[in-house]
Amino acid sequence: MGPAKILVVEDNPADIHILRRSLVDLGEDFYLEVLSDGERALEFVFDQRKNRHDAQPCVILLDLHLPKHNGIQVLRAIREEPVLSHVKVVLVTGLASPQEAAELNHMEADWRLKPASLSEFSELAAYLIALCRGIHAAI
């Protein structure tokens, strides 16, 4: 099996660094692509429509609160794009308003609070790899 291709849409460089370190610590073969805002994430979705030959990520880790377009807007675009509709999406947030939580639950989104410790980042990294490998894991 090849490397797990993980797309991370996150505007916090520290979170990206800790996640990358956690993935390395797992000893798994992975490729991490990082987009820093919702606009770039939407461009990625539209590019996938045009470039179907490009390898798609096995999982997308998506921050809910992003500059330019929020995670809910990006998630909608992903779910509406047939080329990406099968890709697992995990949303993370430091805080979801009651309205956001209701909308995410209505969309049956896999969402959770952002990791706040190294052990939580390790758990998230293991969960992302498990999703890529087709192993149903819960954290």
Image: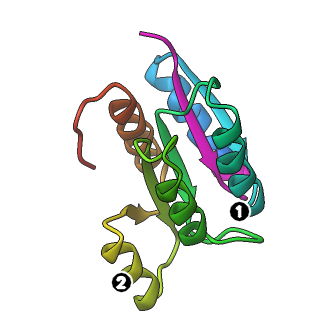
Magenta includes 41?
A: no
| Residue positioned 59% across, 70% down in the render | 73
Measured as percent of width and height from the top left, residue 112 is found at 39, 63
> Dot 1 corresponds to which residue?
38
Q: Amino acid at mark 2?
A: Ala
Quadrant position of residue 131: top left
Residue nearest the viewer, comparing 122 with 52: 52
Looking at this view, name the residue that lies furthest to the top. Answer: 1
> Dot 2 corresponds to which residue?
102
> What span is colored magenta in the figure?
1-15
Measured as percent of width and height from the top left, residue 124 is found at 41, 45
Measured as percent of width and height from the top left, residue 106 is found at 32, 76
- How would you rate the neighbour count of disc 1 (Cα within 10 Å): few for under 14, some for 14-19, many for 20 or more? many
Residue nearest the viewer, comparing 115 with 136: 136
Separation of disc 2 and disc 1 at Cα? 21 Å
Query: Which of the two discs, 2 and 1, labels the residue nearer the N terminus?
Result: 1
Q: Which mark is residue 122?
A: none
